[in-house]
Amino acid sequence: MKYLVTGGAGFIGSALCHRLMQAPDAQVTVVDKMTYAANPASLDPFKGDSRFRLVKADICDFSRMTELVLTEAPDVIFHLAAETHVDRSIDGADAFVQTNLIGTFAMLQAARALYEKGGKPGFRFVHVSTDEVFGSLGPEGRFDEATAYDPSSPYSATKAGADHLARAWHRTYGLPVLVSNCSNNYGPRQFPEKLIPLMVLNALEGRPLPVYGDGLNVRDWLHVEDHADALVRIAEAGVPGECYAVGGDSEKTNLEIVTLVCALLDARRPARGPHRDLITFVADRPGHDLRYAIDASKIRRDLGWTPSRDFTQGLADTVDWYIANEGWWRPLRETVYAGDRLGTVGA
Ligand code: NAD
């Protein structure tokens, strides 16, 4: 099988590459612009492997994407490349509109060029999206495939627009598109601007642990390797034109997550006082959605996918991974992002 993975040097894309490369006959080409969020070290294990190729390119480059897709003729395109940090989208939406909307348009057009040549029977375009497109829930209820779109941030609005493009390319042109809407991912190799790695690294350095608002916003958490398994399952067995809600049934408030990280570090890296003393409540994120939760019955029932990692164990393993892999994150902390507050415009 030949796979083309956009955004494969990012957090989920690299986990997906690790998953795909386990199959001895898999060939994987990554297309990544190598923005601040990419880390080539995440793909180090594949250096020199003739089955793997990293192409540094912008998905907004229409002619390059079409040429690449036609030349590679993949069986599956996994489209993950995106600008992904909500706080950065609040500070400036330009790159989000470009990559998430125009870039998705370019990838769909490139895929269409391949599909309409009739070259690849069974070809699939898996568009990887987020539960954030559905907006905010109150204390009850869960998102599923029938939930109306109601995005709150520039990030989620551009992902919502991209989902609409992807669905329209199926309905209008017959492109075999499948859409996944997944909850918050955690695990190794996540850029340290996101909640869990930011808290782990700040706590290791004895720096404040900024919790937005009252810390009671709820997210559903899924281990990134379970997400990678779900994407593979969707590509293998999903029905073109269908959407799949993917989640871990692990709802936690942000404050619960930070408190759990502190307890794990107290046991592993005892400091003078408990790490929870570093928790600092800061001004809330503008437009901060209260709660996300996913009803993943459809993918469980129709595709037989189920998450296999327990959250408590997965979080402990993730904390251990950051402790053991300073060489992965230290250069990012020192040269790309030191952990400062982002996303306060409009607050
Ligand atoms: P990430 O920010 O870690 O990685 C994104 C990757 O895309 C980076 O390697 C970056 O260099 C690349 N990229 C950005 N702009 C590009 C461009 N114009 N051309 C080519 N490459 C470009 O993101 P992630 O957390 O791995 O998320 C991957 C996908 O999964 C995104 O589409 C995101 O919306 C979706 N998603 C993420 C989560 C989550 O919790 N992280 C949950 C659900 C869905």
Image (tube, rainbow, N blue to C red):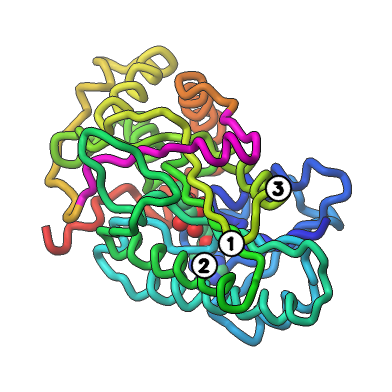
Q: Say whether residue 327 is visible.
A: no
Are the residues flagged by discs 2 and 1 in contact, CB closer than 8 Å? Answer: yes
SS at circle 1: loop
The alpha-carbon separation of the residues under discs 2 and 3 comes to 18 Å
The alpha-carbon separation of the residues under discs 2 and 1 comes to 7 Å
Q: Which mark is residue 237?
A: 3
Q: Point out the tag, 2 or 3, that comes first from the N-terminus.
A: 2
Say which of 180 and 286 sits in front.
180
Q: Position of residue 86 (x, y in %)?
A: 32, 56
Are the residues flagged by discs 1 and 3 in contact, CB closer than 8 Å? Answer: no
Residue positioned 31% across, 61% down in the render: 88
Q: Position of residue 66 (x, y in %)?
A: 68, 81
Say which of 172 and 162 sits in front.
172
Q: Which mark is residue 280?
A: none
Please say if 122 is above or below 264: below
SS at circle 3: helix
Q: Point out the tag, 2 or 1, that comes first from the N-terminus.
A: 2
Q: Which mark is residue 167?
A: 2
The local crowd at label 2, few if under 14, some if 14 to 19, many if 20 or more residues have their Cα within 10 Å, is many
The alpha-carbon separation of the residues under discs 1 and 3 comes to 12 Å
Q: Please name the residue that numbered disc 1 is placed on.
A: 241
Please say if 150 is above or below 231: below
Label 2 sits on what residue type? Arg
Left or right: 93 in relation to 68: left
Q: Which residues are magenta?
A: 288-307
